[in-house]
Amino acid sequence: MAELKLVNVEKAYGEVKVLRDINLDIKTGELIVFVGPSGCGKSTLLRMIAGLERITGGDFSIDGVRMNEIPPAQRGIAMVFQSYALYPHMTVRDNMAFALKIAKKSAAEINAAVDKAAKILQLTPYLDRLPKALSGGQRQRVAIGRSIVRDPKVYLFDEPLSNLDAALRVATRIEIAQLKEQMPNSTMIYVTHDQVEAMTLASRIVVLAGGGISQVGAPLELYERPKNEFVAQFIGSPSMNLLPGEVISTGAQTVVRLANGGIARSAVPTQAADMGLKVNVGVRPEDFLETSEEGMFTGEVEITEALGEVTLLYFKRQDEAAQVVAKLPGIHADLRHKTVTLSAAANKVHLFANGLSLLYR
Amino acid sequence: MEQAILALLTIMIGVGGCVGYFWLSNIVLDKVIFPASGPMAGRNITRANAVRPWLFLLPAVLALGLYLAYPVFATFWLSLNRNEAGDLVFVGLDNYRQMLGEDKFWESLRNNMVWLIVVPAMSTAFGLLAAQLTDRIRWGNIAKSMIFMPMAISFVGASVIWKLIYDTREAGQTQIGILNAIWLQFEGGAGSVLILRVLPVLILLAFAAAVAFVIWGQVKAMSEGGLVARGLRAVGVVIGLWLVYLGVTGSVGAATAQLPYGEPQFWLQIPFWNNIFLMAVLIWLQTGFAMVILSAALRGVPEDTIEAAIIDGANPFQIFFQIKVPQIMGTIVVVWTTITITVLKVFDIVRAMTGGQQETQVLANYMYDKLFVAVDWGVGSASAMVILLLVTPILIWNVYSARKEMR
């Protein structure tokens, strides 16, 4: 049971504000993922919630109680670190029991809590080992176990999977999802730079960029209705193509003449006043269709990457424009050095003016 | 001038000889003995590489053998003989028997044991404290340099400095020794009672209580671990009980002792306490060493584990004693044993300050007195063997811990 509320939270190191105007409501049982490029302050924000970094402005509260000045241990949070941060001189059991021992709980209580957590995480056979005798995945589970034992209101995960190899990362990701299923009432905040983790785990994603929140929303909402060019390009891989153009017809459907000569039709509605507006047309690589008729984009394929299930087409750059990428289903390795015309369904075409989506005006 | 040129020449010959040895012997190995050509090139290269370390180690091994290993055996041999007008007469264990019959030997052994307990413990504890406290403050580095500086002073130099601190003038004259200058400020009033009675009693009782707490923890943990661990715990408990006894009786003594206010004290002539005053010199010298090594070790403790402990609710003391100290335990052992070895060899301080008089004798000075003052090779060598016997196990433990740390 925990609701977190951040109001105008900011973090400044001297004169430099690394985070500002962070407003966020997190409801009980949500799994919130902070994503963003490196240096965007997502880990700093998490550490402010944990109490490891001072909040230099605004209010942060859990269940209506202001937490700005409350020491970390009394906030009802538990944190899983990127490096696991296990105590190397203690056995797995002692690592998990440490917080309870500090809290002067009885031995019976401690043992019960540790055994229960160990059972959930399948750590029972390893309880008497030292961390150095465990594999990376097992260490990560001990770190999670250390959190569970404390029965916190809020779980904080700081890039917990980034030290694991690819296969283990997928497995542990699923374990975390299952853990969340088992504890529907616990609130979790999860920091990652891996958008696959964000898309698969989150009930809502917070995209951080440039010291502020770019957009908050459910994973597919961010994918389908990005608020701005940054979110549009950050979510999805390869990132969304942006083609500059000018509005030539308005109404329920908007028509844009692109700088490369193509015509794009978008389901985003516009008003008469938008006539002649300079816009960027955004199309995800996977939304491009190959066509023989008049399309949005025509170019020569420079490189193909056939992955079996899909083929990535990288087009030759035209002048200064960004490289256009298309992702077509099936195998199309024969398209290399051919000229291909692309179009897209109108409801898959996004429009941005001055970096902001026209959907959200 | 001539001497300077001679010295320069010697250095050049020495260094040139070393370089020449390594260079030429390497060439001989590679070109003549195992040439890397012909039908056996591959095998020759492997063999040359197997021989090379031995080739390069040879001078060091020879020098160490000549100057370290040989003297050990020679000393052992001397300890079994008596020197009669320059001739060695084999007397078996007579020298040891004679030595064991001397009060001065037992006094040295007892004093050495006190040195052994007090100095490494205090130096390591102060060093650890200084390392932790100077880590966070702005002028920490200045404080560190000040604490480290005594390391640059020779033992004899330090002794001279501390002799001035302990210096005594007749009553009425200006005291140039700071300890007496402070002592004469006490006149038996309330302040004196507070500082010279209440404070020592409190410190001694706190020490006894701390030791008792550790004993209690060890007794509770008695059921765990194998036979060896239990045995060690039992020994620790016995030593601890003795320390508690010393603490309690000491506090009674401190509470009831008659203090000669107003009289300048001859600090280095007060039995037992003069040992402590000598130890202060070595503690002052070794704290800097302990601090530097432990400071580096403390910085190596991962910040994450400390933050995890903060979130787990540990207070600064718990973080220090339960998270940081256990993680640098290996380094603490290395520092402790290194200082212990220095302490076992302690000679200069005692020689320069009391000469082993007034019950301050230690083994190394006892050896010197026997060997070079009384010119009794036999007993002198026997006492040297005792020192060697005491140092060796600690040395082995030290090397073992240091190598474990490096892995």
Image (cartoon, coloured by chain):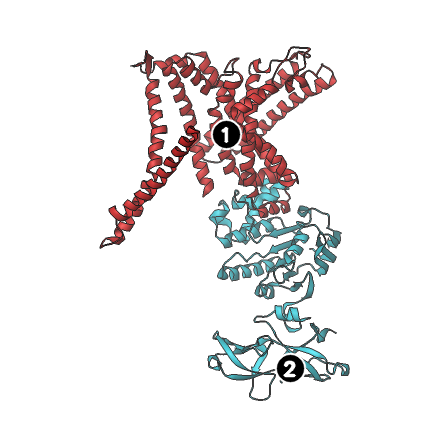
For the residue pair A73 and B353, the one nearer the viewer reads as B353
**What residue sits right under mark 2 in the picture?**
A259
Q: Is residue B167 visible?
A: yes
Residue under disc 2 on the same chain as residue under disc 1: no
Q: Which chain has been coloured red in this picture?
A: B
Q: Position of residue B252 (x, y in %)?
A: 63, 17
Residue ID at (27%, 48%): B31
The quarter of the picture where the C terminus of chain A appears is bottom right
Q: Chain of mark 1?
A: B
Q: Crowdedness of circle 1 by 10 Å Cα count: few (<14), some, many (20+)?
A: many
Q: Please, is residue A79 above or below residue B183 in the view? A: below
Residue ID at (28%, 45%): B29
Q: Is residue B38 left or right of residue B5?
A: left
Q: Is residue A253 visible?
A: no
Q: Chain of mark 2?
A: A
**Number of marks drawn:** 2
**What residue sits right under mark 1 in the picture?**
B339
In the figure, residue B118 lies in which quadrant? top right
Q: Which chain has been coloured cyan in this picture?
A: A
Q: Which mark is residue A217?
A: none
Q: Position of residue A286 (x, y in %)?
A: 57, 76
Three-letter code for the amino acid on which mark 1 is drawn = Ile
Residue ID at (50%, 76%): A303
In the figure, residue A235 lies in which quadrant? bottom right
Q: Is residue A106 left or right of residue A54?
A: left
